[in-house]
Every structure is written in structure tokens, then in C-alpha cells.
Image (tube, rainbow, N blue to C red):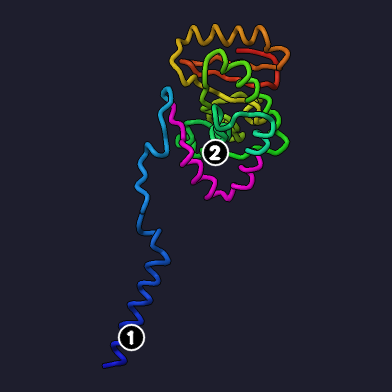
Amino acid sequence: MKTSLLLIVLISVSNIAYANQYESLYKDDINLTYDDLVMDVRGYKVPTRAAFRGWVIMNNAQDKVDKIGRQLLEAGVKVEDTMPLHLVLLQGTDWVLNGTSVFTMPRASHVQSMINTILFIQNFVEPEIGVVIPVSGERTTYYNQSAGGAARSKHMDFCALDLVPAEEISRSELHKKLKEIYRTVGKEHKMGLGLYSGVRFHIDTCGYRNW
């Protein structure tokens, strides 16, 4: 009888230990919703910082992300104010449709190009149209092809951002201001300017041209 009771106790303890060890596989203490991970910005599904945090952990990318973040800060980029790093690393907003990762990591040799682009945006674009929100930054070749990007897209060189204004602005007024920026300071900064549907637009600093 005592032996049976001892076995029952041992089995119970073992089950409790198992349950505690793997509890997070069966229980969720954080009640996340879709809105915690994705935000609608001008019709684009933009991932939140919480979504990025999960991606970083799953891909063991914290050291690489920290290094890029330090480089941007040391160069004078206002990461926390208007240009959160996770949106700079965002491939785009239709990753579900083409089966690719929402974020990606750039080559170390390409980081300076993005620094130049962000500083240009913060120094010349945002003073004219207000805060802008990236909806596409670094892209892999596969994602770029799936998204219909140009074969030599500067997104693949971590030099380009597709953006939308945070504040309300008409398409005509937006284009007017962007074209004026392009006319006055674009050439000296090797500005690439692309105007798309709605209020989405492209900025890079890897070649003076527009479309």
C-alpha cells in the first residue's frame, strides 16, 4: 500500500514538473491580438515593434540589430523620434502573399547607404511634409521580385525606403513638395524619387533620378 502511494506521489510530481517545464507550449499569459502586432497605416499593414521583437528572438538577431541601431544613432539618425529601426528593416507589407519573411538583415557594407538616406529624409523631407512612416526598406532579391520591384532596385542595397506621410496631406500637395525637394537639393544628395499610387513614395540616395 505504501509502495503504491509512493509511486502515485512520484508520478504526480513528475507530471507537475513536466507541466511546469512545458507550460508555455500550452498556456498563453499574454493575450495578444492582431492589433498588437499589425497596424493599419494608410491602407498598409505595418508590423509593430512587438512583432519585430518576436522576429528578432526567433532569428537570434539581437546582436546584429543592436549593432545597426548603434551605427544609426552614432551617425545622428533620430531612430526613436521618426524612424524606428524595425520599419527600416521591413521588407514590405505583403509578405504573407509571397511566403517571405516580414523583416530581413542587410549586409554590413550597405548600412552607410541607409544612414545617408534616412538623414536626407530627416533633414529635408520631414521638415516639409511631417513625419513619414516606412512601409518597405531592406529587401531580399526574392522578395523584391515577388513584389514586382525593379531588377536593380536600391531596396536590395539597403539604400531605399518606401514611405507614407503620418499626417493628412493630399496627393497633389505631397508630390508638389517632393518635386521641389528633388529640384533644389536632390542632385547634390544623389536623390532617387519615385511617386506611386496614393501617398506612397520612394526615396533613396544612391543615384539622382526620378520616376
Three-letter residue code for mark 1: Leu
**Closer to viewer: mark 2 or mark 1:** 1
Q: Is residue 153 visible?
A: no
Q: Where is mark 1, residue-wise? A: 7
Q: Which quarter of the image is occupied by the C terminus?
A: top right
Q: Is residue 46 magenta?
A: yes
Q: Tell me the tag on residue 26.
A: none
Residue 110: image location, x then y, percent: 70, 33
Residue visible at 34% across and 47% down in the picture: 31
Q: Which residues are magenta?
A: 44-68
Q: Which quarter of the image is occupied by the N terminus?
A: bottom left
Q: Where is mark 2, residue-wise? A: 103
Residue 15: image location, x then y, percent: 35, 73
Residue visible at 68% across and 21% down in the picture: 205
Residue 121: image location, x then y, percent: 61, 20
Point out the tag, 2 or 1, that comes first from the N-terminus.
Answer: 1
- Label 1 residue SS: helix
Q: Is residue 9 left or right of residue 114?
A: left
Residue visible at 50% across and 44% down in the picture: 53
Q: Is residue 92 magenta?
A: no
Q: Residue furthest left?
A: 1
- Crowding at dot 2, Cα within 10 Å, few <14 / some 14-19 / many 20+, comes out as many
